[in-house]
Amino acid sequence: NQAKKAWQQPELEVLNVSM
Amino acid sequence: MIQFSPLALSDIVASCKENIVSDMGGEKVMLSIKNGNYYNLGHVGGCIWDGIAEPVSVEKLVENMISEFAVEAEACAVQVVAFLEQLRKEGLILVNEEATSAALA
């Protein structure tokens, strides 16, 4: 058995920069 | 404002290719050429992004995440769908016909 990775709730973060 | 019907497990999704993606400290950061915005997808979000490089059903994507991460199936499905909805709202993914036709192009 391969150890599974820790899960974190995925969130899309919109960074406060824009070209 | 565009209203989308909620994503279902049977829907096919694929990443939009008009983005520049980079790994920064284990997290995936992306610049959308389409809207000029920068996004941080985080670590898990980056893995989901990698998982939709080619058209895949939401159900299959969730299965892949469950096999890779320590997470309950139901929680995983809810959170993956919510994340995909965020991506769709920002115009970062293609859904169903868009996804499959883009893959053939």
Image (tube, rainbow, N blue to C red):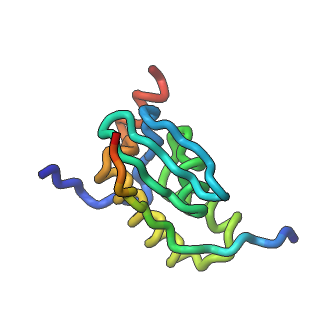
Q: Position of residue B38 (x, y in %)?
A: 41, 48
Q: Is residue B100 above or below residue B57?
A: above
Q: Position of residue B65 (x, y in %)?
A: 62, 63
Q: Position of residue B42 (x, y in %)?
A: 54, 61
Residue drawn at x 52%, y 50% is B29
Q: Is residue B41 left or right of residue B101?
A: right
Residue drawn at x 59%, y 79% is B72
Q: Is residue B86 left or right of residue B44?
A: left
Specify the quadrant of the image occupied by residue B5: bottom left
From the viewer's side, name the closer residue of B26 and B6. B26
Residue drawn at x 50%, y 67% is A10
Q: Is residue B51 above or below residue B16?
A: below
Q: Is residue B58 above or below residue A18?
A: below
Specify the quadrant of the image occupied by residue B62: bottom right
From the viewer's side, name the closer residue of A3 and B22. B22
Q: Residue reaching furthest left?
A: B1
Q: Is residue B36 left or right of residue B64?
A: left
